[in-house]
Amino acid sequence: MSPASPTTGSGTVAGPRSGQRILVVTPYPPVRDGIGAYAVQQVRSLRRQGHDVEVVSPWPSAAHHHLALEGPKGAKALKKLMAGFDRVIVHFHPDVFYANPSTPTSRISTGTALASAFRAGPPVEIRLHEIDRRWASATEQVEASSRGGFVATQVFEQAARASRSVFKAADEITVHVPEHQRMMIDSFGVDPGRVRVVDHGEDFTRRVPDDQAAARASLGLPAEGHVFVCIGFIQPHKGFDRAATAFRGLSDDGASLHIVGSVRLDDPSAVDHQRELEALAAQIPSVHLHLGFVSDEAFDRWIVAADTIVLPYRHIWSSSVAERARLYRRPVIATRVGGLADQIGEHPENTVVDDNAGLARAMAAAVGREGAATRPISTWEFDGPVDRSAVQAEVHRRAAAQRGIKVKTGSAAEGSGAGRVRPGAVPEHVATPLRRLRAVPPPPATSARPGVSTVKRLIRRVIAWEVDPLREQLIDLQRASVKAAETTDARLDEVTDELDER
């Protein structure tokens, strides 16, 4: 397809090209994947338009074809399959096509093979979901890797050329926000006429009626009170812990926060994050964690049940959750990462925040709390040298305040001295910092120098019998420390209760 060809939704060509045979390359259900969930809606839309659509996925799924798409062999297999179609739509994410996206050698071999496949077959549209801008620049890659020298620079330059060639070989690149359109043009050198911004939710349709009362009843939620919802896969970069911390104290206004989603059990960081969320839900009133698979219909029911959708992401390109919230006209609070600010637009009920303090203010404002702009943030601050007795007294005072017990001014519990904790701060539990520690992963066996990655992998196998037991011991020690700290927290609460009673 030439850049000037007229197009309709999903990048399909209008007029004589209606009724095309289209191949969609994407992860696909029942594999739980955000791109796959997005692609299902696109495939349905294409079929409603009269196209004959087949799907190829990198793993066994409900797709028509399954191909191992990683590496040069995957690119060659895809090239062969593409030959029988009028058009190909590739949902691009590096993890699908690159065996090891972090290494320049992988980007060179795979990028070169993908570019060759895209040039040789039918017209290709790349629906871009994520790519590192630094891949297009040898200089930025060298700086990021902390590797110098002539050989490393040459390798990274080859990797940058191969990465740019993938997108230049496509007939069209479709993105969801103008920021990524500019990146494709300025950084990757794609012809501006071949880069198009499409509405993230152009193929989305409603799955349930927009009846909040019915949705809440079906989910077992109270009919009254402001309901915040964070929904999606439980992963650290989603930042659901940030929303829980920002929500602290809003239960007094009748509000509740519901964190909904499933955990990828093959991701240790996600499992650790689940434990952190469980601890926060146990500590903070009216924070609820709903773990488990969420069907498409249940997903929409949670959106409908919500008064506000919270997207406290640490990193993301664009969000299908934001689009489904827009579909049902639910307000969104989102962090300013990736293309979220552009995606949710300037709707008066939507709010973009820059940090945790802004997130807390936005959530407080959503429930109508007076003085939301000056709401205190959870932190410790000291005016001078730390007085341990004053700190402990402050802990008792705050614990009593959380239980609705008034502490007399000037009493021992009020504390004194220069080391007093500033009023308004909220202490963390002893176990909280320990839960934030991540398991120690083995360092990646990668190198910018050809052949060194293979040597590193061989060395790892040789020394694994010595190193792995030490790593496991560290993990066990961390778990034991968390358990001991949780026991200490529980005992401190008991002591505080006893002091309150006295």
Image: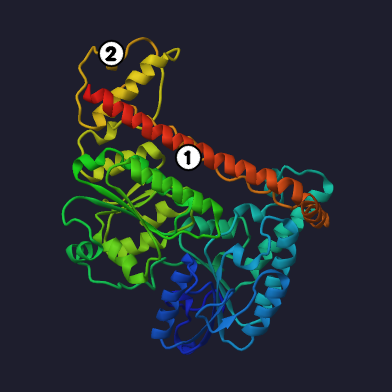
The kind of residue tagged 2 is: Ala
Q: Residue at x 19, y 55 (%)?
A: 222
Q: Residues within 10 Å of mark 1 (few under 14, many from 20)?
A: some
Q: Residue at x 36, y 15 (%)?
A: 390
User: What label does residue 483 carry, if any?
Assistant: 1
Task: Looking at the image, tell me whether mark 1 or mark 2 is earlier in sequence order.
Answer: 2
Rendering quarter of residue 419 = top left
Q: Residues within 10 Å of mark 2 (few under 14, many from 20)?
A: some
Whether residue 469 can be seen here: yes
Task: Tell me if residue 239 comes above or below residue 369 in the rendering.
Answer: below
Q: Quadrant of the C terminus?
A: top left
Q: Are marks 1 and 2 in contact (CB under 8 Å)?
A: no
Give the x, y percent position of residue 105: 76, 59
User: What label does residue 262 carry, if any?
Assistant: none
Task: Tell me if residue 328 comes above or below residue 186 in the rendering.
Answer: below
Between residue 239 and residue 205, name the one nearer to us: 239
Colour mode of the rendering: rainbow
Check disc 2 and report its element: helix, strand or loop: helix
Between residue 294 and residue 501, name the one nearer to us: 501
- Which residue in the protein does label 2 denote? 412
Q: Quadrant of the N terminus?
A: bottom right
Between residue 78 and residue 239, name the one nearer to us: 239
Rendering quarter of residue 3 = bottom right
Give the x, y percent position of residue 94: 61, 63
How far apart marks 1 and 2 lie (CA) works out to 31 Å
Whether residue 315 can be seen here: no
Q: Residue at x 27, y 58 (%)?
A: 330
